[in-house]
Image (cartoon, rainbow, N blue to C red):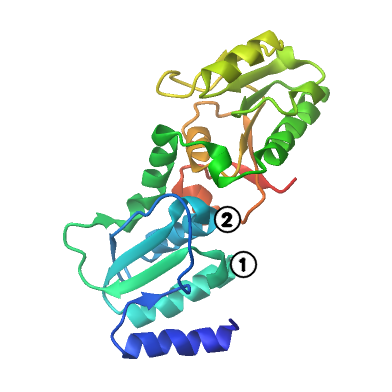
Amino acid sequence: MSSRPRKAFLEAQLKSGQALPITAPVQRLRLSLEPWTAAWPQDRVALVQALAVAAAFPELVGAVRIMIAGDVEAALATLLEDLAALGLSPDDLPTVELMAGDGAGAAHVGALPATLAASCEYERRSWTEVFPHDDVQHAAVWALAADAVASGRTVTVLAESLDGLGEVPSPDRISMVCGQPAVRRRARRSGVGAVVPRPPAARYLPAADVIVCDGRRPDDLALLGGSRSDRSEMVAVNVRSLTAPALAALGAGRVRAITR
């Protein structure tokens, strides 16, 4: 849908008193975190960050309904402008609805990013359900790790697969953080220098010159954001739009997102 017909559609929805969708309804997977509440314009930054996170992880977020206390029409227009300034369009989002209301009893929209990361961390659903071609992304994570090791640096990798480890010239210079016991055992047999479980079983990420994760995982980004390794370069190998507000919302403002 072009921007002009979409704007006319949104205005028609507003005038009819219906919920105001930022995107046309589409079928998405995973989490449905709703309802959320926000005040306009006080929560403009929190709203932009939440929508940026939704755009980065649409398969995980599912549908989002936000109750706005304030001028919903002004909120919609401004948020669309803010998203456009980030290079995001309504088509980048999962199903999002802005509705007028005080949202009494609902969680504040600022909690959406952390709730998403925590849900992904502790539910630990099969990643291949969401991304059937996961090996491609894991290979990119390990390729970046291989480059860093080849240049003489130590690396910590957050991964759930060893596909691509064979390309690392000195696996003993690698530390791996992994949630799957079977994969951790294989990593140790493959010569990986240090292999640790994910928090809370592990209290911290192993220190390294470079820490690499899969940019499609909000839980990985949150782990990097909470790292005590102030001197580490943090990199998320990402194949989707991952903007600065989304990283900031996950506490990962230091992380550099790249497409590889």
> From the viewer's perspective, is residue 125 above or below residue 149?
below
Residue under label 1, please give it: 87
Instruction: Write the residue at 49% across / 26% down.
Output: 228
Is residue 254 among the parts visible in the rendering? no
Where in the figure is residue 253, as x and y percent of width and height? 53, 45
| Amino acid on which the number 1 mark rests in the picture | Gly
Q: Is residue 162 left or right of residue 6?
A: right
Residue under label 2, please give it: 243
For the N terminus, give its image quadrant. Answer: bottom right
Q: Secondary structure at mark 1?
A: loop
Q: Earlier in the sequence, mark 2 or mark 1?
A: 1
- Kindly check if marks 2 and 1 are in contact, taking CB atoms under 8 A apart as contact: yes
> From the viewer's perspective, is residue 226 above or below residue 78?
above
Where in the figure is residue 15, as x and y percent of width and height? 33, 90
Q: Secondary structure at mark 2?
A: loop
Q: Nearer the viewer, residue 3 or 74?
A: 3
Is residue 20 among the parts visible in the rendering? yes
> From the viewer's perspective, is residue 83 above or below residue 123?
below
Q: Is residue 235 left or right of residue 227?
A: right
Q: Mark 2 and mark 1: span between their CA atoms? A: 9 Å
Instruction: Write the residue at 44% across / 80% down.
Output: 77
> From the viewer's perspective, is residue 30 above or below residue 201?
below
Where in the figure is residue 97, as x and y percent of width and height? 37, 70
What residue occupies the far left of the structure in this picture?
A: 104
Instruction: Write the residue at 72% across / 30% down.
Output: 142
| Amino acid on which the number 2 mark rests in the picture | Thr
Could you say which quadrant of the image residue 110 lies in?
bottom left
